[in-house]
């Protein structure tokens, strides 16, 4: 199973929430509450996103975090890499050549590199602006969720 870490998942959630009001300053406590992410986790993620240049930090009583650039120019891949580091589906993709003892006889590494690039490319093609805007299908499913849970459609 290929799965994002919880931190990467939470980072996408926090950034999506912030992208809904991109000009506002968001403090860690409020954005954590609104996103249902624990405050210490939200603080850690917001700081990592700031170090990666995706957020700017404003100090002071009315301070907080703000998107450092347009949500249309931030990609899901940017967010994941800011929190988890480079996107790598296998160990041999994330390490330097020669780090794997099977490398000289492995016929899969070139294929994994292609697959990794396709996955990373797909994540790079999705902007924060796109995921911050509820899709019509998601809105429809959310509106029908009580009916779905009750077994009605």
Image (cartoon, rainbow, N blue to C red):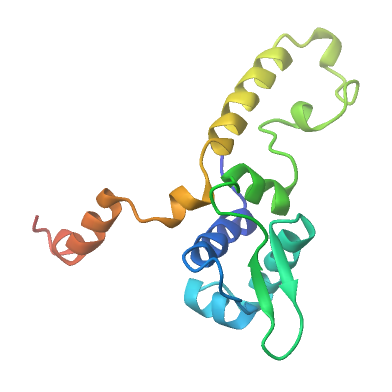
Residue lying at the far right of the rendered structure = 98
Rendered image quadrant of residue 69: bottom right
- Look at 66% across and 46% down and name the residue there: 78
- Which part of the image, by quadrant, shows the N terminus? top right
Q: Where residue 7 sits in the image (x, y, percent)?
A: 64, 59
- 2 vs 57, nearest the viewer: 57
Q: Where residue 14 sits in the image (x, y, percent)?
A: 56, 65
Q: Compared with residue 67, is residue 115 higher up or lower down, i.e. above or below?
A: above
- 25 vs 105, nearest the viewer: 25
- Look at 78% across and 33% down and name the residue there: 94
Q: Where residue 107 sits in the image (x, y, percent)?
A: 72, 8
Residue lying at the far left of the rendered structure = 152
- 125 vs 113, nearest the viewer: 125
Q: Compared with residue 91, is residue 6 higher up or lower down, i.e. above or below?
A: below
Q: Compared with residue 104, is residue 89 higher up or lower down, i.e. above or below?
A: below
Number of numbered discs:
0
Q: Where residue 76 sits in the image (x, y, percent)?
A: 57, 46
Residue lying at the far bottom of the rendered structure = 61
Image check: 39 left or right of 97?
left
Q: Compared with residue 139, is residue 80 higher up or lower down, i.e. above or below?
A: above
- 39 vs 67, nearest the viewer: 67
- Look at 62% across and 52% down and name the residue there: 5
Image check: 116 left or right of 86?
left
- Look at 64% across and 18% down and name the residue there: 114
Image check: 46 left or right of 38?
right
């Amino acid at each position: 199973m290929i799965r994002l870490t919880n931190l990467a998942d939470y980072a996408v959630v926090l950034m999506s929430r912030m992208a809904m009001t991109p000009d506002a300053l968001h403090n860690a406590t409020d954005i954590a509450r609104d996103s249902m992410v624990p405050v210490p986790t939200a603080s850690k993620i917001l700081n990592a996103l700031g170090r990666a240049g995706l957020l700017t930090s404003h100090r002071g009583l009315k301070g907080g975090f703000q998107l450092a650039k347009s949500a249309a120019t931030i990609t899901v891949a940017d967010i994941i890499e800011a929190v988890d580091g480079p996107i790598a589906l296998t160990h041999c993709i994330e390490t330097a050549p020669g780090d794997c003892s099977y490398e000289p006889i492995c016929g899969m590494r070139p294929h994994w590199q292609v697959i990794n690039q396709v996955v990373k490319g797909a994540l790079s093609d999705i902007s924060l602006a796109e995921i911050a805007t509820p899709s019509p299908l998601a809105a429809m499913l959310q509106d029908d969720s009580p009916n779905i849970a009750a077994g009605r459609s």
